[in-house]
Amino acid sequence: MEMREASLDERRQFYSEEWNKRELPDFILHTLSLREFGFDLDGTGPSHRYNQFMTVEQLAEYVKNRAPYSAFTSVALYEQPSMRKGWMKSELAFDIDAKDLPLKSCSCTSGRVCELCIDEARRIAMEFAETMSKDLGLHNINFVYSGRGFHIRVIDDAIMTLEQTERAQIVEYITGSVIPTDVTMALGYSQVFRERLARTFEGMDEQRLSKIRRFRRSVIQKLMVEKERALGAIRRGKLDELSELEGIGPKTFRQLLEFLVRLNSEFTDGKVTIDTKRILRLPSSLHSGVSMKCMLVRDIGRFKLEDAVPKFVHERGH
Amino acid sequence: MIAPEYVATLDPFVAEAKKLVETSPPLDSMPQEIVDRAIARAKWSSKDMVVEPDAEAIRADVLSFYLMCQGVAAVSYPYSREARLISDATKETIKYRMYDLFKRGHEDSCLDVIKRSLKLVQLEGSDGVKLGGIEIPREDIYKIRDRRLAQDGIETIDDRLLPQYLPRYGVRWTDLAPLLRHRRAELTKLYLVNGRAVITPRDLWDLFSDFIAVRTDEYVASVYERFSDIGAPSNRLAEVGEHISSLLPSELELRERFTRMPRGKLRPEFFPPCVKIAMGGVGSGVRNYAITVLLTSFLSYARASPSGRAATRIGDFIRDISVVQDEIAAPIFEAAERCKPPFFKDQPQEKANIYYHLGFGMTTEPRPEESGKSKWYRVPNCSKIQMSAPPLCDPDELCRKIKNPLTYYFRRLSEHARSGVGG
């Protein structure tokens, strides 16, 4: 699927013919007047901030008239969104951008995305949501296809008033970016860590492992030969079996573990989650950079990229 | 069954405790025995921590707690070393009292108090252990036990102590947010199932006593803010605070012991929004307030971090006058220059007024011996800033939880220190 930039005419066509207020998720619609809206009108960045809409009709009029390159809304609710004052609470948001995934099985160049890496981002989003539900007991979890990846927007009351430090700790937990004291427990963070570690290690090849400083070639080769055995050990929480592989002492093992953990932390942009005043792409709007609709995904397991393709893309070349 | 008022000794912030304070004479007119208790509790050993279940002992305990907090707020600042000393001491006290009550078979009374702050459930089942319908593997239960035993350095255990180490409760992790915020708890160290952390009685005492410690820190901050509003605290409170402060090793001694300890340099990245706005220079309507009132007091108190005695003279806390000139006055003058129009250009006399507000009298050449010649102005509370200079006030989330810009700064510093991030 070709993901090229939308022209101004295509944007206008999208907002006048296809954009529908019914595609705004309820969690935004019901708090519309409490959110800050931001717009990028010409592709130079979201410089039109501090907008407030009292009704969805006002928003509709704005986007139809201006056909913005990008539209955003805050994760925060404010008493005075047009001044970003009177912060009330914020969604817990995760940004899983396919172009920034630290491990991809596709050959996309930097800054590009394809169906394959978008699907990888989708699977990461599902993993994260499962942990949030099973471990953190969060249930009001919304998925948004952003155009280049996925946003997870959690609106459970219990987490809306959390501050940056708590949110930073949630990122650590969900991504598995802290080495636990016990990796063998069946449930809890121990399990999350094993799963994330196994997923990351599975994506390793010789080239990626060679990025670890002072990692010997023979060690890399050994790890690749014994990859299945090593993966099994990680999944069972028997990490010490890894350090027993020939040529891998405790120091090398530690280096490997720290490398994998750092990669774990890069599957989402932690800054987005921590920032309680962030603006995120508005579901229902157009991602003009790739000519895709940013949309609420009701069933992430069955998401198909075709659902997010605007009509004008189908009409291209006709 | 223990007396209902006894809850106040486990949580000094419950309504029963507040009622005791309200129906007692003012804290600064307390009898000597309460004053002594307020000072002593910062260094209590476990035998001192237990309170007899009679009304007078409970009252003395609660009053001495509040006197201790107010004394510290009178001679230091939010999240100061003194504040940490008493919040840690309070944590140990509450923890020991919990332990003592459990030991004497009063678990239910303890849980009643805890449940006012933390949503707690008992783990279900006598055979397999369940939490919210999810079966927790038996092996994990023993691992949680062993982890806690290792944490306490216990290698062999008798049947009497064992139940304290077996997972028995589930506590909602979101209730622990204040502990996560201050890094007194870490999410990745909790065993989380379906939104609850599976914990042992020992963990519960730790978490709850940490919870009270955080509230103690917040209470000291709120009293400090109140003093900023009403002026200098009473001599009696300052006296209690000075005694508590004297229990700490001196700054100098500490620096020698830990050579990497920060030397109190200002950290602008932790300044509150109003100070950042003032530092950037402001327009003619609010220049005077931003520079002379807010920045002068904020930067001087933030840099001096006065502790150990009531803050009346900057010279008591900063001996080296170059610190006043280079680290306090210089950034104030730079901010004044950035104002539109530059503040001192049309009001050159204001330069002397800056030193006047720092307590050196009307001068442009401050000398250490002149500290105290004029009043060292305290940092105005947020409500005053909002009223006097609304453009300076652009609150963020933390602003909603504090009432004075200094509390903001010291809290951010404290959070940063606890996060273990260097620099």
Image (spheres, coloured by chain):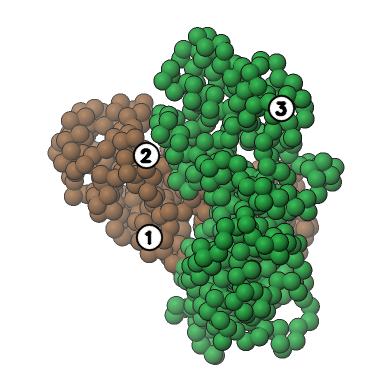
Chain colours: A brown, B green
**Image mark count:** 3
Residue A70, picture quadrant: top left
Mark 1 lies on residue: A156
Question: Observer-nearest residue: A293 or B415?
Answer: B415
Q: How far apart are marks 3 and 1 (CA)?
A: 54 Å
Residue B30, picture quadrant: bottom right
Residue furthest to the bottom in view is B127
Residue A210, picture quadrant: top right
Name the residue located 60 percent from the left edge and 66 percent from the top edge: B62
Name the residue located 43 percent from the left edge and 29 percent from the top edge: B389
Q: Circle 2 sits in a helix, a strand or a loop, which is it?
A: strand
Q: Circle 1 sits in a helix, a strand or a loop, which is it?
A: loop
Name the residue located 78 percent from the left edge and 50 percent from the top edge: B246
Tags 1 and 2 both on a single chain: yes
**Chain assignment, label 2:** A
Instruction: Tell me which amino acid carries mark 3.
Output: Ser
Q: How far from the left and from the top, in percent, is residue B419?
A: 63, 49
Position above or below: A264 against B283? below
Instruction: Tell me which amino acid carries mark 1.
Output: Asp
- The reply, left or right, for residue B197 in relation to residue A11 is right
- Which label sits on residue B369? none
Tags 3 and 1 both on a single chain: no
Mark 2 lies on residue: A85
